[in-house]
Image: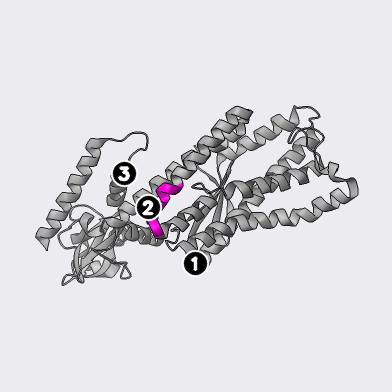
């Protein structure tokens, strides 16, 4: 119901817009369609203004993406919301300098837009005087072609200042986090930046109530919720980095031999299986390959005839976070886990989802019994692996 809509791709990056962005056009119709001096022309100019802001935010996010790609980071997509945009980067670099450059690349693009509009504003000021740059009524009460230019420059200037606030998850907050990381560590630096963001949000709510600027209150709530979500994400990431994939791999009787008949792989039902030869991983037999092989007839066919020989193999000491990233990039549902080159188990996407739900429960409801069971499961897994070793 609330899934983002894909508008297209730019250099391999999906550009999405959230359905809530439609509320901005509703505001345009109410503000400039039925207000004083409203009509079709103001509504058209208002929609044009929204589209130009849309493009400005997209350029801002593309700045982040271009810098992230320079540092070898994969950009998943860009999603535009009523209050801004979000570029999903697979992993922000932990090196402070790289994070600072990526964080500042977006505001640099917004600054370039403001600078590009200045000659037009100066030209208008020279021709019509400085009064021409001030709307006849209050800001956004009416809109003319000249007001459109002024609104566009003013909104981009506001977005530039807002994004440079040293409050997480704004770009300035990420710069603050990167600056604090060498002294505090990434997780504690994130916590500090989140608290700064919460403080800014609280101050904005007070100012909004005092001056009756209800839009400012909405911005503040967005800032505070986003800061909490970002902080929770970093905590989960830190936990995933500490856990090794070997603790959560499932033993499946040593996999299946490439010399076994294809029908032998059906024991226990069709599923993804690791193919091993003398304890070493030689391939994967994916469920889809197994079913397709059976549909083509099984007479004389072996596991080795249909298995995938190009597989990613994880070591049991690899972190859950790193393994999951690779699984995501390769679009794999399972990976074999080895120790000293010998097969020790299989780690599946279902295991990761289950683990993620235990580590990152509903932020509005914490079940202590669930957390205790998660700790017990980890302890049991560790003991079982120690016995196997």
Residue 85 among magenta residues: no
Mark closer to the observer (3, 1): 1
Q: Earlier in the sequence, mark 1 or mark 2?
A: 1
Q: Secondary structure at mark 3?
A: helix
Residue 129, horizontal then vertical, whole percent: 88, 46
Q: Crowdedness of circle 1 by 10 Å Cα count: few (<14), some, many (20+)?
A: some
Q: Which residues lie in the magenta part?
A: 183-193
Question: What predominant SS class does the magenta segment belong to?
Answer: helix
Residue 284, horizontal then vertical, whole percent: 28, 65
Residue 166, horizontal then vertical, whole percent: 53, 49
Label 2 sits on residue: 187
Q: In the rendering, which numbered label is found on residue 291?
A: none
Judge from the rendering whether residue 105 lies leftward or rightward of residue 293; answer left or right: right
Mark closer to the observer (3, 2): 2
Query: Which image quadrant is residue 341 in?
Result: bottom left
Q: In the depicted view, which residue is nearer to us: 89 or 268?
A: 89
Label 3 sits on residue: 357
Q: Secondary structure at mark 2?
A: helix
Residue 238, horizontal then vertical, whole percent: 34, 53
């Amino acid at each position: 119901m609330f899934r983002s809509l894909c508008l297209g791709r730019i250099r391999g990056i999906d550009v999405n817009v959230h359905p809530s962005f439609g509320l901005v056009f509703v505001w345009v119709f109410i503000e400039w369609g039925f207000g004083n001096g409203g009509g079709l022309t103001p509504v058209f100019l208002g929609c044009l203004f929204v589209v130009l802001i849309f493009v400005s935010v997209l350029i801002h996010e593309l700045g982040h993406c271009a810098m992230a790609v320079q540092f070898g980071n994969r950009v998943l997509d860009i999603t535009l919301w009523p209050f801004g945009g979000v570029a999903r980067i697979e992993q922000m670099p932990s090196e402070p300098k790289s994070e600072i450059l990526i964080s500042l690349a977006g505001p640099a693009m917004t600054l370039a837009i403001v600078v590009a509009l200045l000659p037009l504003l100066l030209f208008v000021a020279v021709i019509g005087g400085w009064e021409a740059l001030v709307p006849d009524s209050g800001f956004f009460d009416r809109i003319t072609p000249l007001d459109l230019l002024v609104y566009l420059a003013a909104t981009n200037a506001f977005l530039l200042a807002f994004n440079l606030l040293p409050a997480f998850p704004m770009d300035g907050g990420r710069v603050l986090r990167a600056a604090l990381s060498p002294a505090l560590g990434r997780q504690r630096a994130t916590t500090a930046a989140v608290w700064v963001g919460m403080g800014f949000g609280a101050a904005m709510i007070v100012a909004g109530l005092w001056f009756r600027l209800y839009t400012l209150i909405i911005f503040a709530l967005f800032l505070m919720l986003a800061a909490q979500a970002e902080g929770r994400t970093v905590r989960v990431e830190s936990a995933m980095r500490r856990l090794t994939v070997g603790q959560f791999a499932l033993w499946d009787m040593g996999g299946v031999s490439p010399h076994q008949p294809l029908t032998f792989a059906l024991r226990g039902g069709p599923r993804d299986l690791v193919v091993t030869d003398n304890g070493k991983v030689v391939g994967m037999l994916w469920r889809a390959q197994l079913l397709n092989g059976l549909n083509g007839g099984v007479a004389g066919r072996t596991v080795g005839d249909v298995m995938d020989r190009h597989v990613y193999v994880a070591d049991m000491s690899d972190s859950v976070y790193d393994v999951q990233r690779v699984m995501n990039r390769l679009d794999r549902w399972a990976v074999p886990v080895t120790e000293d080159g010998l097969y020790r188990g299989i780690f599946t996407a279902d295991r990761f989802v289950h683990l993620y739900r235990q580590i990152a429960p509903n932020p509005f409801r914490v079940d202590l019994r669930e957390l205790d069971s998660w700790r017990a499961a980890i302890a049991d897994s560790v003991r079982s692996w120690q016995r196997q070793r």
